């Protein structure tokens, strides 16, 4: 099984100043094209939040148009820039999305249980799960006795050293960590929000963040860091799972680089 994770697309309308600054729609269109033609064509795509920048209906309509060419199932999730009601209204055919309440759901028809959490806290840059969603997560993991689970969420539950971004992290990370620590069947925790690739050991599993298709956060570590955006290449993650080896994650730039040397299979 091969899962593509793309995140923080921040789609805006053409007349938004951010469109000229970051070309978010163009970059997402290129990511879609890449996923459709790559030799490593994924079985599904998870979009882990900040799908659009302002949560407007027209932004979601543009998002729908941009991702419509994808030739595989697409699962949408909310980030702090999203509006859950507007997202639901524009994607009524995505029936895995709950009609009311948090946009959390579980996909149970594959070799791994896929759990999507909703960390959206309206009006805030930080994320929060809340007691009810944490109880739901606990129950979903408890019921997962025949396979491991992947947890997808927008806000990471761990600090990264990018202090300004860490201040916009998951508010109830301690409570989330308590749930995670009770379950040994969590294959990975996969997050967005940070606009960089990071990973850390977390409560008995591995947690990581996915780079953005729009723009990245400059790597300025330490207590005096500032928040800067940089136009590093658009990037996504490919999560490759086999029964023998579990989950292996690859960074994939949204660009096809030509081979400069090739060895035939079986040649030593």
Image: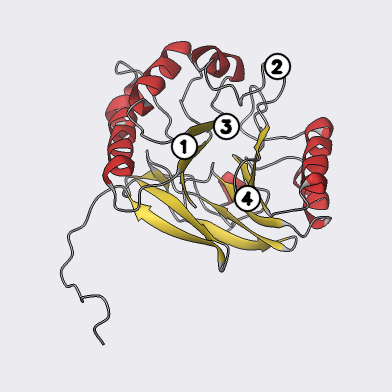
Circles 2 and 1, Cβ within 8 Å, touching? The answer is no
Q: Which of marks 4 and 2 is nearer the N terminus?
A: 2
Label 4 – label 2 distance at C-alpha = 26 Å
Residue topped by disc 2: 100
Quarter-of-image position of residue 244: bottom right
Quadrant, the C terminus: bottom left
Left or right of 44 on screen, residue 29: left
Q: Mark 3 points at which residue?
A: 79
Q: Which of 51 and 230 is in front in this view?
A: 51
SS state under label 1 = loop
Which residue is disc 4 drawn over? 112
The image position of residue 31, as x and y in percent, is 32, 40
**Residue that mark 1 sits on:** 8
The residue that appears at 61% across and 51% down in the rendered structure is 111
Mark 2 vs mark 3: in front? 2
Whether residues under marks 1 and 3 lie with C-beta atoms below 8 angstroms apart, the answer is yes
Question: How far is mark 4 from mark 1, CA to CA?
Answer: 24 Å
Find residue 24 and report its horizontal and vertical position in percent. 34, 31
Lower position in the chain sequence, tag 2 or tag 3: 3
The residue nearer to you, when weighing 91 against 2, is 2
- 20 or 92: nearer the viewer: 92
């Amino acid at each position: 099984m091969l899962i593509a994770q793309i995140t923080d697309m921040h789609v805006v309308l053409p007349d938004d100043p951010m469109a000229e600054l970051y070309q978010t729609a163009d970059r997402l269109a290129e990511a879609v094209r890449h996923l459709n033609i790559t030799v490593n064509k994924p079985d599904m795509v998870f979009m882990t939040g900040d799908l659009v920048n302002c949560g407007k209906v027209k932004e979601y309509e543009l998002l729908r148009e941009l991702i419509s060419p994808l030739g595989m199932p697409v699962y949408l999730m909310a980030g702090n820039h999203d509006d859950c009601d507007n997202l639901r209204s524009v994607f009524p055919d995505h029936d895995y999305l709950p009609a009311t309440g948090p946009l959390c759901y579980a996909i149970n028809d594959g070799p791994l249980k896929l759990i999507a959490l909703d960390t959206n806290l309206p009006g805030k840059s930080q994320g929060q799960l809340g007691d009810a969603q944490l109880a739901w997560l606990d129950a979903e993991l408890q019921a997962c006795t025949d396979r491991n689970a992947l947890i997808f969420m927008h806000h990471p539950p761990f600090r990264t050293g990018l202090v300004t971004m860490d201040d916009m992290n998951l508010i109830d990370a301690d409570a989330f960590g308590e749930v995670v620590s009770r379950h040994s069947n969590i294959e990975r925790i996969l997050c967005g929000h940070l606009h960089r690739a990071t990973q850390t050991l977390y409560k008995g599993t591995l947690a990581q963040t996915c780079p953005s298709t729009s723009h990245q956060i400059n790597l300025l570590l330490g207590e005096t860091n500032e928040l800067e955006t940089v136009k590093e290449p658009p990037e996504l993650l490919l999560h490759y799972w086999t029964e023998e080896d579990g989950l292996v994650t690859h960074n994939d730039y949204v660009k096809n680089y030509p081979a400069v040397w090739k060895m035939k299979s079986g040649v030593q």
